[in-house]
Image: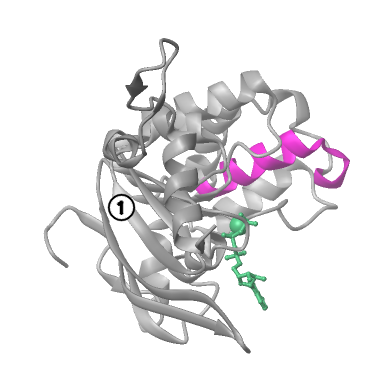
Amino acid sequence: MPNGHTLVETRALIMRFGPVTAVDGISFSVDRGEVVGFLGPNGAGKSTTMKIIAGFLEPTSGAAFVAGHDTRLDPIPARRHLGYLPEGAPAYPDMTVADFLGFVASLRGLTSRQTSNRLAELVESIDLAEVWNRRIEALSKGYKRRVGIAMALVHDPDVLILDEPTDGLDPNQKHEMRTLIRALAPSKAIIVSTHILEEVEAICTRAIVIARGKMLADATPAELLARAPERHGEDHQMVKTTRLEDAFRHITLEQAGV
Ligand SMILES: Nc1ncnc2c1ncn2[C@@H]1O[C@H](COP(=O)(O)OP(=O)(O)OP(=O)(O)O)[C@@H](O)[C@H]1O
Ligand SMILES: [Mg+2]
């Protein structure tokens, strides 16, 4: 580990699915206190990289470390430090939210007293009271997403890997989720993928741009903006863009040769 604050590190990760190279040499590290945004077009390799860090996929080559533990060689201590929100909805559609989160807490080794305290906190911070005794399969998409977030947070992990955490949430809940992520940030290392560029500016201290499995940028949102070409301002002067979208298009389309 490069220093005592580094909680996530990937070294030259490569993931091949048959002829497709989904992840093509990704190396970066994330320290406590950082919120790193994964940005990139559909199919770029964001979710695959997250699955490798979470220990759900073994890379073809390279390595990932969580809190200093190799996710392949040392998976149990790595997972203890990690909360992961995958794409899509949580499994166990027949369980109620209460039973499901209680089950997750028992898998995470919480005592029944710890479980009731922790679940009470999560009901509050993730606003789950309304659906607490409903079955997961009967929930709306946004509530399923919230249950997934609660699942990732049950054991208060040091590292959070959140794959499109605000996908499917209504605008108020998007705002709440961003507020929650910002509140968690100082004590954790967080990686979030998103297609919403304003979200990157709202919550991320750094952004990693990925396309076709390769890292095209690893910079602060302000540094990314500085890379975008100038555009015509209202008075026809050339001005620096203030839109991260322009920077994203410039970086990802330039690489694709469009
Ligand atoms: N299990 C799999 N088997 C075969 N190919 C896969 C598998 N999982 C992902 N891929 C391929 O790997 C590439 C990267 O996919 P990935 O899901 O990581 O992209 P992403 O950046 O998360 O995209 P999105 O923005 O659409 O979520 C794609 O070409 C995808 O089709
Ligand atoms: Mg994805």
Q: Residue furthest front?
A: 236
Mark 1 element type = strand
Q: Amino acid at mark 1?
A: Asp
Residue position for label 1: 218
- Residue 193 horizontal/vertical position (percent): 51, 48
Magenta-drawn stretch contains 142: yes
Q: Residue at x 54, y 57 (%)?
A: 258
Residue range highlighted in magenta:
136-152
Majority SS type along the magenta span:
helix
Magenta-drawn stretch contains 63: no
Q: Residue at x 48, y 58 (%)?
A: 109
Total labels: the figure holds: 1
- Residue 226 horizontal/vertical position (percent): 28, 36
- Residue 242 horizontal/vertical position (percent): 38, 25
Q: Quadrant of residue 70?
A: bottom left
Q: Residue at x 47, y 42 (%)?
A: 114
